[in-house]
Structure formats: C-alpha cells, structure tokens
Image (spheres, rainbow, N blue to C red):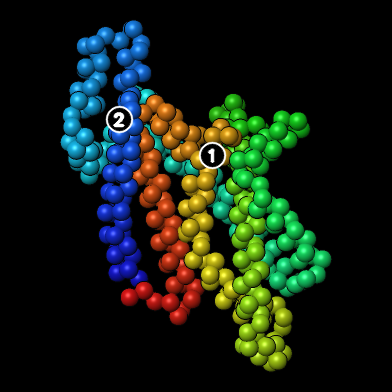
Amino acid sequence: MWRYTLKRMLVAVPMLLGISLLTFVLMRVTPGNYLDTIRMDPQFSKETIRHYEQLYQLDKPLAQQYIRWIYNLLHFELGYSFHYNVPVHKIIGERVWNTFVLSLSAFLFTWCIAIPLGIGAALNRNRPVDRAVQFFSYIALSFPGFFLAMIFLFWASQTGILPLGGMHSPDYDRLGMGGKIVDLLKHLVIPTRALSVGSIAALQRLMRGNMLEVLGQRYILTARAKGLPEGRVVYHHALRNAVNPLITLLGYEFSSLLSGAALIEIICSWPGLGSLMLTAVRSKDVYLVMASMLMGSILFMVGNLLADIALAKVDPRIRYD
C-alpha cells in the first residue's frame, strides 16, 4: 500500500503541472490583464503602471513568467495577489479551510442520510416506504443545487430562523466557544442542504440497488437458512459487500462537492474558494487563480487516493500491486 501511495503521489506531480500550465495559458490568452483596470484610473501614472509590470513580471515573456512561478512554487511561494495586495498563500489558507468545512459538512450529512435510506428502501422493496423514498429522490434529482440554495435563503428571510448568508454572525468574536460552534452550525445549514439534496437522492438509489443485488445472492440465503438473526445477515454480511462500490465513489463524491460548492458559496456568501475564484477571474488575478486551481486539484486527488485506500481496507480481496 505504501508503494502504491507513493506511486500515485509521483503521478500526481505531472498532472498538477499540466493543470497549472493550462490554467496559466487560458488566463493569458484571454484579452487584457490586471493592469488594464489600473490604466483606466487617472490617479495612476505611467511610471506607476510600469513599476507594477516589473514588480509582477508582467513585462516578461509568458514562458519566463510560468517558469518563474514554478520556481517560486518549489520554494513554497504561490505568488502575489494583485487584487488583494497580499501574498496568495495568506488568502488561500483561509479560503481552503472554509471550503473544506462546507464540503465536509455536506459530505457527512449526505452519507449519514443516504446510506440508511438506501438500506431501508431495499429492505422494504415495493412497499409504501420504498415508493415514498424513490418519489422524493426523483424530485430531489430534478432541482439544481443553486436553485435550492435560493429557495432556502428565501425561506430563511421570511422566517428569520436561520442566517441569510456568510460564515459567521457580526458578534461572532464576542461569543464563547459553545456559541461560536452553534453560530457556525447555523450558517452551515442552508449551504449544506443545498449541496446534499441531490447527492442524497443519487447515493441512496445506488445503495438500494446494491443492497437488492447482494440480498439476492446465495450466501445470504445460506446465512438465513443457518438461522442467523436478520440484523446480522443484513448489516454484517450484506451491507459490507453492498457498500464496496460506494466507497469507490467516495473520493469522487467529496471532490465533486469541492467543485460544486463554488456556486453555492457565491449564492450563500460563504467565504470559500468559489467566491475567491470568481473575484480572481474577474480581476484577472493570474497567480491567485492558479493557486486556487492548484489547491482544488490537490484536494481532488487526495480524495480519490483516500477512496482507493479505504476500499482496500474494507475489501481484503483488493490489493494494489
């Protein structure tokens, strides 16, 4: 397993370089740059603009700019943000954590709801419980996450039960530790639900199908013929094999939440990578865009690697050579 993990990490290096190069080229081939917004401001002189070009190395050839960024990256420097006027790593550090908190919350909520729903639907096949779960799943799959976020925000504005956006309340710093946790959880409710509804519907359908397939296997019939309790048959023998295909999806599910959280973050004013990326792209902040894409790609690859490792731990038949 250690050899496989090391191999995956080595393979990830050229992939990350390719992603960063593609991001850099796409940002550069589009018209304009950050200094174009400054040139329209009469308060900035030509000497000041020329100074910024030299400071940010925007007067150098594109290949030299990219090589210089890679050189700085090897020294753990992500560059300088033009828009925020601070080093990129200071902004990315905060925003990556915020996105991770939201994605982890949606991930845990999705799996804790979808797996029991799928098991219950499979055990009550074609009964009213199963039909109700499948009916609501079809409805949930029909609503985009951003539309659900707007509905939830409208409901919160009418009831006043939940905050209307952001990550913290204005008096967050004056709260105690327990108050801060409660405040964060309240702000997590709307974006978490908006991200999770569609995922819950899809995941429970997969869980239901896997459980029905496993429950029809001969070894399940043998276990029941031996007189084993139904709970042991379902949760020890059947569930362990039915959940294996879902573990493969675990990394992709977590990664898709990281990427899908961008639009939800913008709608719910959540200070994560999504809103940061939008601001960076609109202001042509090249190094901030590249760093954001790099962080998102790393989280994506780590999620897939953890899914493969978890699958090998759960299923002893799987070995990575």
Give the residue displayed 23% in from the left and 27% down from the top.
58
Q: In this view, does 228 lie above or below 309?
A: below
Give the residue displayed 65% in from the left and 36% down from the top.
150
Label 2 sits on a secondary structure element that is loop
- Locate residue 64: give its quadrant: top left
Give the residue displayed 36% in from the left and 11% down from the top.
41
> The disc labelled 1 sits on which kind of residue?
Leu
- Locate residue 178: give its quadrant: top right
Label 1 sits on a secondary structure element that is helix
Residue 105: percent from the left, percent from the top?
A: 57, 49
Q: Is residue 93 left or right of residue 109?
A: left
Q: Mark 1 points at which residue?
A: 263
> The disc labelled 2 sits on which kind of residue?
Tyr
Residue 178 shows in the view: no
Q: In this view, does 106 lie above or below 93?
A: below
Residue 69: percent from the left, percent from the top?
A: 23, 38
- Which numbered dot is residue 105? none
Residue extending furthest toward the top: 42
Q: Which of marks 1 and 2 is nearer the N terminus?
A: 2
| Quarter placement of the N terminus | bottom left
Q: How crowded is mark 2: few (under 14 residues within 10 Å), some or many (20 or more)?
A: some
- Which numbered dot is residue 80? 2
Residue extending furthest toward the right: 128
